[in-house]
Image: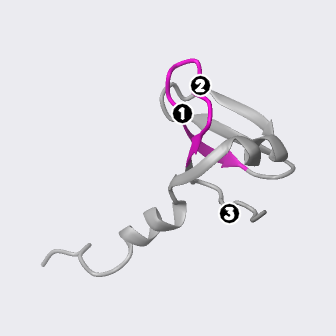
Amino acid sequence: MERKSFQLGDVVLMKKNHPCGSNEMEIIRMGMDIRIKCVGCKHSVLVPRAKFEKNMRKVLRSASEDSGQNDGAGGALN
């Protein structure tokens, strides 16, 4: 089975909803455990990496895509 790829700052879709109703979580800390923050209510939870990988469906917004949009020409107006 292929390992899921994710990184710090990604917004991921989880299998189960948070009690507030949202199932989108932002990764705010990575290590043996992963700290995720609910996009809906801003509550954070520390989850073991194995459990996180099992319950994560997909990456909705990647942190690398967000930083790439801010680079390039178009920021300066003359």
Q: Quadrant of residue 55?
A: top right
Look at the numbered disc 2 and give the secondary structure of its residue: loop
Q: Are marks 3 and 1 in contact (CB under 8 Å)?
A: no
Q: Is residue 50 left or right of residue 41?
A: right
Q: Quadrant of the N terminus?
A: bottom right
Q: CA distance from mark 2 to mark 1?
A: 6 Å
Three-letter code for the amino acid on which mark 3 is drawn: Ser
Q: Specify the color scheme.
A: one colour
**Residue at position x 54%, y 29% from top?**
42
Q: Earlier in the sequence, mark 3 or mark 2?
A: 3
Three-letter code for the amino acid on which mark 1 is drawn: Asn
**Extreme right residue here?**
32
Mark carried by residue 18: 2
**Extreme top residue here?**
19
Q: Badge 1, how many Cα within 10 Å: few under 14, some, many 20+?
A: some
Q: Which residue is mark 3?
A: 5
Q: Which residues are magenta?
A: 12-29
**Residue at position x 78%, y 37% from top?**
47
Q: Are marks 2 and 1 in contact (CB under 8 Å)?
A: yes
Look at the numbered disc 1 and give the secondary structure of its residue: loop
Considering depth in this image, is 13 or 10 the residue closer to the camera?
Answer: 13
Q: Which residue is mark 1?
A: 23
In the image, residue 28 lies in the stretch drawn in magenta: yes
